[in-house]
Image (cartoon, helix red, strand yellow):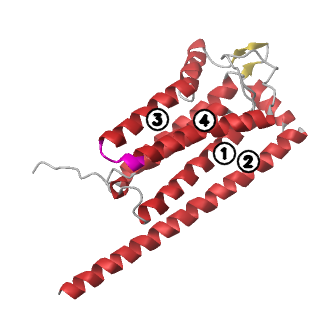
Amino acid sequence: MVESDKQSVASESLAAHRRWTWSALVLAAISAGLAVGFFSLSRAVVRGSTGDLDERILLAMRQPDNLADPIGPRWVEEVGRDVTALGGVAVLSLISATAVAFFWLASMRRAAVYVGIASVGAILLATVLKQSFDRPRPDLVPHGSVVYTSSFPSGHSTMAAAVYLTLGMVASRFVPHWRLKVLLIGVAILVTGAVGVSRVYLGVHWPSDVLAGWAVGTSWALVCWCVTIWLQDHGVIEQDLGHPVEVNRVA
């Protein structure tokens, strides 16, 4: 009976290892595809191939008779500023610090380090890429938000994709039902998308900037998650990160 139990445990362990390996390979492939897409887009931007489409999309979000006025009522513009703040360094730093503190206080310190590295790495990655390309900001319309850095890729879009998707994927591992997992990851995707659209709506980024930011930020989040899966499989990161929280039911 004991031998049978050992074989059963070994079989389950091998099956789990294979699932995690397969998941890591899929995530790595998607991340590589996004990275290739980013570099292809960056080459097109450097050549000026995206200029016409960028201008058409940007102008489509403005009143034809007054380019200083974004389409929609005034409250929509205010919502755009609120949403764009969700991709700012201050807000993302606060959210990331809260998540790191949660994992640390929950005695999941290696997981806390992982979230911290994923968040800080996203900020550094966006900064380095911006300085490398040094693309000017759009000058067709007045800016609806104060900007200090260059345009490509969108830092807000990059950081939002990396941080929110990372936190969404981590949080989804704590819930037992697939609907809750879809909700968490879906909200992360929705917020990431809304932040990017708001940057174009406020006239501070070209659409290609945002698309590039989404690509590189998502790629970074997937790389971090792929590494996490590998580390969990080898017992480096706490296994609790991959186990759903038990929901107590009242009989």
Q: Secondary structure at mark 4?
A: helix
Residue position for label 1: 216
Q: Residue at x 31, y 39 (%)?
A: 105
Sort mark 4 into few (<14), some (14-19) or many (20+) by Cα contacts within 10 Å.
many
Q: Residue at x 63, y 55 (%)?
A: 31
Residue 71: x, y in percent?
68, 19
Sequence-wise, which precedes: disc 2 or disc 3?
Answer: 2
Sequence-wise, which precedes: disc 1 or disc 3?
Answer: 3
- Mark 1 and mark 2 in contact (Cβ < 8 Å)? yes
Q: State how far apart marks 1 and 3 are (Cα).
A: 19 Å
Q: Is residue 77 visible?
A: yes
Residue position for label 3: 96
Sequence-wise, which precedes: disc 3 or disc 4?
Answer: 3
Sort mark 1 into few (<14), some (14-19) or many (20+) by Cα contacts within 10 Å.
many
Q: Residue at x 80, y 36 (%)?
A: 133
Q: Secondary structure at mark 1?
A: helix
Q: State how far apart marks 2 and 4 are (Cα).
A: 17 Å
Task: State left or right for residue 148 relative to residue 165.
Answer: right
Q: Is residue 31 magenta?
A: no
Q: Secondary structure at mark 2?
A: helix
Q: Which residues fall within the magenta stretch? A: 106-111
Q: State how far apart marks 3 and 4 are (Cα).
A: 11 Å
Identify residue type, mark 1.
Answer: Val
